[in-house]
Amino acid sequence: MMYFFLSTRNDPPTSTTGRNVIARRSTRRARRLALARSWKTLSAAALIDSVPDLTAEAAGTQLALGDTFATQQRWAEAQQAYFQAHGLAPDNPDIAYNLAVALDHLGQRRPAASFYRQALRLAERQPARFPRHLCETRLHALQAQDPSP
């Protein structure tokens, strides 16, 4: 593969700068080839074993993204990020709660109430960081506004 080096200076192609660019590109290509070879040697079991870790990491990333949007009061974007996180970690009570809060801010009372209920149910099975009393209070307020399930 040929690489062309274009400089705004009048350096000849054999200059140190040109060789450095070509060397960096060659190094990147070598790394990509090494990575491709290492993927070929991984067993299917090793890949399957790594999926839960990747899923948890992706859920954490989406949760952090949602938190960032929420602090900026960008509720539609926060709701999308929390929904992605919830899809990756549906048993996480804090994600369900954050999704409920985002939906609540968007005026989507019924879905918000549903996720507040889900967060409370999940919090019975595993530790949660959200304030349960605030969740219960808000759920009761939403139910009073809309008595249907």
Image (cartoon, rainbow, N blue to C red):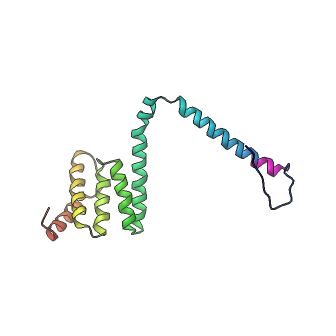
Magenta stretch, residue numbers: 15-21
Which of the two residues, 91 or 134, is positioned nearer the viewer here? 91
Q: Quadrant of the C terminus?
A: bottom left
Which secondary structure type mostly characterizes the magenta part of the structure?
helix
Q: Residue at x 45, y 30 (%)?
A: 44
Q: Is residue 35 magenta?
A: no
In the image, is residue 55 above or below residue 46?
below
Q: Specify whether 24 is left or right of 103.
A: right
Give the total number of marks visible in the rendering.
Answer: 0
Which of the two residues, 102 or 29, is positioned nearer the viewer here? 29
Give the percent coordinates (x, y) of residue 53.
Answer: 42, 40
In the image, is residue 138 above or below residue 12?
below
Q: Is residue 20 magenta?
A: yes
Q: Specify whether 112 is left or right of 40.
A: left
Give the percent coordinates (x, y) of residue 79.
Answer: 35, 62
Q: Specify whether 119 is left or right of 55.
A: left
Q: Residue at x 16, y 65 (%)?
A: 140
Give the percent coordinates (x, y) of residue 102.
Answer: 32, 64
Which of the two residues, 89 or 10, is positioned nearer the viewer here? 10
Q: Residue at x 80, y 50 (%)?
A: 18
Q: Quadrant of the N terminus?
A: top right
Which of the two residues, 78 or 140, is positioned nearer the viewer here? 78
Q: Residue at x 30, y 49 (%)?
A: 92
The single residue placed furthest to the front in the displayed view is 1
